[in-house]
Image (cartoon, rainbow, N blue to C red):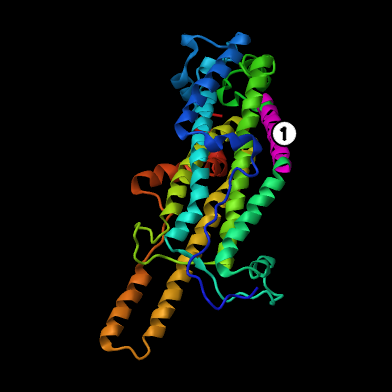
Amino acid sequence: MPDSPVRSSAVDVAEFDPYAAAIPLRWLRKVPGGALLLLAPAVALVLVLSAAAGGMLGDAHEFQPVEDFWRAVGRNNLTVAVGLRYPLVRDTLVWLFAAIMIVEVMIMHRQWRLFKACLPKLIANKVIKPRHGLTAENADDPPILRWAARFPPEQRLARYLERTNERNRRHAAVFTTAFVVSAFVLALLLSLGQYYGLFRIFMPTDGSAAAREQWRRDAYAHWWAGIDHPIGAITYFLLTALAIYMILAQTHVGVSIARIAAALPRLVQLDANWINPDGHYGWDPVRQIFRSVWLSMALYGIMVSGLAVVLGLGGGGWIPAAFWFILLWIYVGLPWLGIRRIETAARERHIAIAEAEAEGASTRELDELEARVQRYRKARIRPMRLGSFARIPVLFSVALPVLLNLFQPYVEKWLGN
C-alpha cells in the first residue's frame, strides 16, 4: 500500500533471532553467561581422560612450553637420533586452542544477545526512523524495496526481520546439516594436513632429508591425538569439528547481520542523534557489539596463526588464512563501509535541511544555523573504533594470519625451517 498521509515518527520494534538457524545452539538462549565457565573443566576432563586412556597423558617433566617455543623459533637442540614424545601435558597449542574456543563460546553468547537487543535500542535512540516516499510501482527498484513498499513505513523493518527469522527457522534443519557435514569434512582435512605436516617446526637440522622426515613421522606416532592413539584422535577430531561448526554458525549469523545491515537503508531512514546522549550519536549499541567482535577476531587470529604455522606457511597455511580473510571482510570490512555511508548520508541530509532553513532567516538565525552545520561537519560516528590501549595488540592479532603467509620466507627463516 502507499504511504499513509499521517506519518508516524517511530519504527515498530522488532528483534533478530540469531539462534533461529542454529538448532544445536538454541539451549544457550536461557543459559547465564557465567554458567559457561563450566565448559572449561568439562573440556579439560574430556581431554585428560582421552589421553590417559591411550597412555599419553604425560607427567610433569614433559611439560616444556618454554623449551618447545624456543625450538619452534629456531633454537632447536633436537637430533634425529632422539625421538620426540608429545603427550597431552606437552601439547601447549591444544590447551591454548581449547581455552580460546571456550572464551569464544562466551563471547558468542554475549554477542548474540547484543545482536538481538541492538535494533530495538537503535530505534529507542531515534537513529532508525520510518522511510517515507516508497511506492511499489517502480519496476526498476530492487525486489526488497517493492516488497517493503506494500507495508506502512513504520512496519517495514519489523516485517523484514520477521521474514528473516521465519526463513532461518524454516531452513534450520538444512543449515544445521550443511554446517555439521562441512565441519566434519574440514576437520578431516585438518587431520590429514596434520598427518603430513605436523611437527615440521620441530624437525632437527642434522641428518638427511629422509631421516628428518622419518623423525617427524615417528613424532606424529607419539602424539597423543595421532591415529596410533584412536581414543585421543577421535576426541581431538570431534572437538575440532565442534569448534568448526561454531565458527560456521557464527559466520552464518554474521552474513545474516550483513544482509540486514545492507537492507536497512532501503527499509528505514538511518540517522544520527545530534544531541549525542551516549557519546556515539545514538550508535552506542553497535559499539558494544564491536567491542566483542574485535576481541573475538583477535583470539581467532591467534588461533588461525598457530594453525597456519603448523600446516606450513605458503602452502596449507593459506587455507585457514583465506578463510580468515573472508571472515574479516564479513565482520569488519562490510560494517565499516556501511557505517561510513550512514555517517555521510546523515550529515548531508541535515546540512541540506539547515541550508533550506537559511532562506529568509535573520542574522541571528543564520549564526545558529552555521554553528549547527559546523557541528554536523565535525561529528564522527565511530562505533568500530578501538581504544588507544587495545588498538595495536588487537589489530596485530587480527592481521597476523595474513602477514605470516605474505612474509613466509622471512618467517620461516626466523623459525629456522
Mark 1 crowd level (few <14, some 14–19, many ≥20, 10 Å Cα): some
Q: Residue at x 46, y 45 (%)?
A: 294
Q: Which residues are magenta?
A: 174-195
Residue extending furthest front? 6
Question: Was residue 185 drawn as part of the magenta stretch in this picture?
Answer: yes
Measured along the vertical axis of the image, is residue 362 above or below residue 262? below
Q: Is residue 85 visible?
A: no
Question: Was residue 378 drawn as part of the magenta stretch in this picture?
Answer: no
Measured along the vertical axis of the image, is residue 384 above or below residue 185? below
| Lateral position of residue 268 relative to residue 216, left or right | left
Residue extending furthest bottom? 360
Q: Which residue is mark 1?
A: 185
Q: Residue at x 43, y 63 (%)?
A: 126
Query: Principal SS element in the magenta part?
Result: helix
Nearer to me, 186 or 72: 186
Q: Position of residue 253 (x, y in %)?
A: 60, 47
Nearer to me, 135 or 344: 135
Determine which quarter of the picture holds residue 159: bottom right
Q: Position of residue 386 (x, y in %)?
A: 40, 50
Q: Position of residue 237 (x, y in %)?
A: 66, 25
Q: Position of residue 170 (x, y in %)?
A: 71, 47
